[in-house]
Amino acid sequence: MKTLTVNIPDTLDFDNKDLAMILASRLYEQGKLSLGQAAELANLSKRTFAELLGKYGVSIFNYPASDLSKDVANA
């Protein structure tokens, strides 16, 4: 795994766990990481990561609406 050093302004009230969760949730949302990979990045279990996604404005169902419509039509 790569290590990244980020300088953030002191005015932002984030700790390392918050930043890891923000990064992991956004990468999951974009489809860059699987749920398991994102959970590992955030240093959480899959279950805990999935439960916290809503707090960060990310749906656990990372599925495009257009695909969902097709699936419903084919059901």
Image: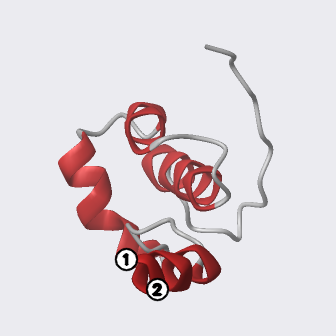
| Residue at 38% over, 36% down | 36
Residue 39: % across, % down: 38, 40
- Residue assigned mark 1: 54
Q: Quadrant of residue 74?
A: bottom left
N-terminal of the pair, mark 2 or mark 1, is 1
Q: Does 49 sit left or right of 3 as displayed?
A: left
**Disc nearest the viewer among 2 and 1:** 2
Instruction: Tell which of 47 and 13 is nearer to you.
Output: 47
Q: Which mark is residue 73?
A: 2
Instruction: Say what amino acid the circle numbered 2 marks.
Output: Ala
Label 2 – label 1 distance at C-alpha: 28 Å
Q: Nearer the viewer, residue 56 or 28?
A: 28
**Whole-percent x and y of residue 16?**
51, 44
- Label 1 crowd bin: few (<14), some (14–19), many (20+), radius 10 Å: few
What numbered label is drawn on residue 21?
Answer: none
Residue 58 point in image, percent of width and height: 49, 73
Residue found at x 49% / y 41%: 34
- Residue at position x 80%, y 44% from top? 7
Residue 59 left/right relative to 7:
left
Of the 4 image quadrants, the one containing the N terminus is: top right
Question: What amino acid is labelled 1 in the image?
Answer: Gly
Q: Is residue 66 above or below residue 52?
A: below
